[in-house]
Image (tube, rainbow, N blue to C red):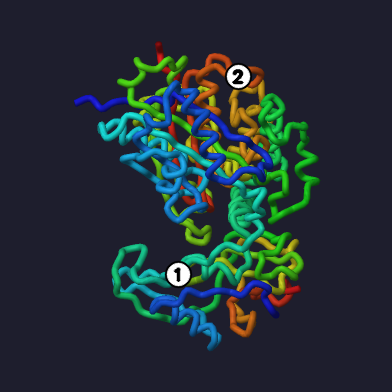
C-alpha cells in the first residue's frame, strides 16, 4: 500500500517582536487562525495538534481547549528549537500511516515581555552536576563548542561574525525582521563578549512571537485551493545528549545523521538543495551544521561562509528571513525556519526571493547542540 | 563565598555518594564493573553498556582542559563575581566534567592545559573546581 505524502499548505507568523498584550496561547491562536486561513481550511478540520513549550503542564490539551478543537492525535515533543522540524516529521509519519489527514503545528512565546530568560533555570538531575561550574546556558555551551572549533580548525572570530553579517543582510530584505540595520564584521567583534568567544552579535535575538503550519495528506489537496503545495519529501531527527558536558562528540552534531537520513529518504542530494534554513541560535551553530550536513567538510565552514557566499546574491542562500540572529527569536526558532522555507518554495519572498527555488533543506538544532531534526521540502509540481 | 541563588541537589541513591564525597574532599566517580568505563554523572546504569553493576571509586583529580570559555555575564549562582573561566575538563579516568577554573587568568586559558581538582566552599558546602597544575600558570 503506497504511503500518503504530506504537504504543507498553510503557514503564518503571529505578531512578533515585543508583544506584552499577548500570552503564549493567544500568539498560537493568532498564528493558527492565519495559517488555517492561508490553507483555506477551518480550525474544526484539524485532527492532529502539535506544539511545544513550557507554558503549560499539558501543552497540547491546554492549547486544544483554548482553540476549541478535539484532536485525536497530539504531540508535544520538545527538543528545543528543533521541535517544530520534528513535529513536521511526526505529522508526515502520521499522515503516511493514515491516522489523520490534517495537522496543525503551533508555537508561541512571550519570553521577552516576561523577562523569563533572566530567571534561573530549574535544576534537573543531570544538570545539578554542572551547576557548580556556573556556566550560563545555552550560550556558554555554544561558546565551548566555538572555542574547540577554533582550536581544532583555526576558525576565527571574523569567520563567526560573517554569519551574523549575512543574516542581517537578509533581514534588511524582510519587512517582518526585528533587526534590519546592516552590521559589519567589526561591529560584531566590537559588541560586548558574553561568553568567550561569543559576542552579543554572535547570539540570537530575544523576542516574543509565534507561528503555525498546516500539514495535510495528499488526497486533501484537490479540495483546497493551495497555490503551491509544498511536499514534505523526507525527514529525520536525532538526540545525542542534553548537557554539553555529555556531548559524545562536541563538534560533530547530530545533524550528521539526521541530515543524511532526511536526504536519503527524500531521494535528493545536497546539490539539489536550492535554499537552506539552518538553525542559527549562535553563529557557531551555523558553522557546525554546514559541516554536519556536508555542505562543506569538517573544519571548512569558516571559509565556506566567507566572501559573502551566504549573503543575498551569493551562491549559497542561507537563512533568508534573517534567522534567529536578525528576524526574531522567541526561544525556539524552528517554526520560522519552516515558514520561510515554504515561502521561498512558493515564490512569495519578494526582495529576498531565491530565484527558481524548488528544493529546501531545513535543519533545527535544539538544547545545547543536543538534538537535531532535518526536513527536506519540495515545491509540488502542479 | 556565598552564592546568590542556592545550589540545588537532587539526591537519590546514585547521586548521594558523589555529594557526600565532596564534603570529605573526595571526587567520587562510578565505575562500571561490566565494561570498565568510569561513569559521570552518577546514575543507575552504565550509559556505555547499560549494565547496572557499578562501583564507586575516588578520582585521581587530574585532568586536561578540552575546551574553555570566559563567562562575562555570571550565572545567577555567582551574580557578584567578575569574569571567570569555565572549562570542559577531561579527567584521566576518561570522563568529562564541566568545571570552573580557579587561579587562571582568562587570557591564559588554553586547550590542553593540565589541571587538578580542588574543593571550594560555596554556601557552606564543598564544590569541585580545577586549577592549573603548573604553579607558574596560576594567577
Q: In the rendered image of this protein, does residue B38 appear above or below residue A176?
A: below
Does the image show residue A299?
A: no
Image marks 1 and 2: residues in contact by CB distance under 8 Å: no
Q: In the rendered image of this protein, does residue B106 appear above or below residue A48?
A: below
Numbered disc 2: what chain? A
* Cα–Cα span, label 1 and label 2: 49 Å
Among the 4 quarters of the image, the one containing residue B123: bottom right
Numbered disc 1: what chain? B
Q: Which one is closest to the eye, mark 1 or mark 2? A: 2
Label 1 neighbour load within 10 Å: few <14, some 14-19, many 20+: many
Q: In which quarter of the image is the C terminus of chain A?
A: top left
Q: In the rendered image of this protein, does residue A355 appear above or below residue A50?
A: above
Could you say whether the residue bearing mark 1 is in a helix, strand or loop?
Answer: loop
- Left or right: B59 with respect to A207? left
Q: Residue A353 carries which label?
A: 2
- Left or right: B10 with respect to A264? right
Q: Residue furthest front?
A: A68
Whole-percent x and y of residue A7? 39, 25
Q: Which sits in the foreground, A206 or A193? A: A206
Q: Name the residue located 45 percent from the left edge and 39 percent from the top edge.
A: A67
Q: Name the residue located 58 percent from the left edge and 46 percent from the top edge.
A: A23
Among the 4 quarters of the image, the one containing residue A214: top left
Whole-percent x and y of residue B129? 61, 74
Among the 4 quarters of the image, the one containing residue A90: top left
Could you say whether the residue bearing mark 2 is in a helix, strand or loop?
Answer: loop
Label 2 neighbour load within 10 Å: few <14, some 14-19, many 20+: many
Residue that mark 1 sits on: B40
- Left or right: A248 with respect to A347? left
Do discs 1 and 2 share a chain? no
Q: Which residue lies furthest to the top in this view?
A: A382
Whole-percent x and y of residue B99? 59, 69
Amino acid at each position: 500500500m503506497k504511503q500518503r505524502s504530506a504537504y504543507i499548505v498553510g503557514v503564518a507568523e503571529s505578531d512578533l517582536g515585543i508583544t506584552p498584550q499577548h500570552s503564549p496561547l493567544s500568539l498560537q491562536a493568532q498564528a493558527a487562525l492565519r495559517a488555517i486561513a492561508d490553507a483555506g481550511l477551518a480550525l474544526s478540520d484539524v485532527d492532529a495538534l502539535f506544539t511545544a513549550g513550557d507554558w503549560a503542564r499539558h501543552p497540547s490539551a491546554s492549547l486544544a481547549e483554548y482553540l476549541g478543537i478535539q484532536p485525536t492525535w497530539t504531540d508535544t515533543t520538545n527538543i528545543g528549537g528543533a521541535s517544530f522540524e520534528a513535529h513536521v516529521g511526526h505529522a508526515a509519519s502520521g499522515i503516511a500511516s493514515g491516522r489523520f489527514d490534517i495537522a496543525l503545528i503551533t508555537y508561541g512565546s512571550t519570553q521577552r515581555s516576561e523577562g523569563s530568560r533572566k530567571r534561573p533555570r530549574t535544576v534537573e538531575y543531570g544538570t545539578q552536576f554542572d551547576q557548580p561550574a556556573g556556566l550560563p546556558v545555552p550560550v556558554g555551551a555554544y561558546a565551548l563548542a566555538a572555542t574547540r572549533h577554533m582550536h581544532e580548525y583555526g576558525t576565527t572570530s571574523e569567520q563567526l561574525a560573517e554569519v551574523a553579517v549575512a543574516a542581517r543582510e537578509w533581514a534588511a530584505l524582510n519587512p517582518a525582521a526585528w533587526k534590519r540595520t546592516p552590521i559589519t564584521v567589526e561591529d560584531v567583534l566590537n559588541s560586548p563578549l558574553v561568553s568567550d568567544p561569543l559576542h552579543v552579535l554572535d547570539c540570537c535575538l530575544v523576542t516574543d512571537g509565534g507561528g503555525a503550519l498546516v500539514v495535510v495528506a495528499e488526497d486533501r489537496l484537490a479540495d483546497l485551493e493551495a497555490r503551491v503545495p509544498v511536499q514534505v519529501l523526507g525527514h529525520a531527527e536525532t538526540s545525542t545528549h542534553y548537557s554539553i558536558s555529555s556531548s559524545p562528540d562536541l563538534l560533530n552534531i547530530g545533524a550528521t545523521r539526521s541530515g543524511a537520513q532526511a536526504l536519503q529518504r527524500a531521494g535528493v542530494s545536497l546539490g539539489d538543495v536550492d535554499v537552506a534554513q539552518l538553525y542559527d541560535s549562535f553563529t557557531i551553530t551555523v558553522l557546525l551544521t554546514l559541516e554536519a550536513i556536508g555542505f562543506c567538510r569538517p573544519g571548512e565552514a569558516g571559509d565556506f561562509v566567507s566572501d559573502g557566499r551566504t549573503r543575498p546574491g551569493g551562491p549559497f542562500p542561507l537563512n533568508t528571513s534573517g534567522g534567529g540572529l536578525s528576524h526574531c527569536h522567541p526561544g525556539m526558532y524552528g517554526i520560522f525556519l519552516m515558514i520561510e522555507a515554504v515561502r521561498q518554495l512558493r515564490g512569495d519572498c519578494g526582495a529576498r526571493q531565491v530565484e527558481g527555488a524548488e528544493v529546501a533543506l531545513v535543519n533545527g538544532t535544539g538544547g545545547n547542540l543536543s538534538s537535531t531534526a532535518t526536513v527536506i521540502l519540495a515545491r509540488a509540481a502542479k | 563565598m556565598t552564592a546568590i541563588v542556592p545550589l540545588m541537589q537532587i539526591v537519590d541513591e546514585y547521586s548521594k555518594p558523589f555529594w557526600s564525597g565532596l564534603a570529605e574532599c573526595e571526587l567520587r566517580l562510578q565505575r562500571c564493573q561490566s565494561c570498565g568505563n568510569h561513569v559521570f554523572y552518577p546514575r543507575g546504569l552504565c550509559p556505555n553498556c547499560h549494565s547496572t553493576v557499578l562501583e564507586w571509586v575516588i578520582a585521581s583529580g587530574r585532568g586536561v582542559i578540552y575546551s574553555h570559555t570566559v563567562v562575562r555575564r555570571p550565572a545567577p549562582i555567582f551574580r557578584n563575581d567578575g569574569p571567570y573561566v569555565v572549562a570542559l575538563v577531561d579527567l584521566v579516568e576518561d570522563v568529562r566534567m564541566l568545571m570552573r577554573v580557579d587561579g587562571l587568568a582568562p587570557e591564559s586559558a588554553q586547550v590542553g592545559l593540565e589541571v587538578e581538582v580542588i574543593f571550594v566552599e560555596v554556601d557552606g558546602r564543598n564544590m569541585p573546581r580545577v586549577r592549573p597544575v603548573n604553579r607558574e600558570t596560576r594567577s
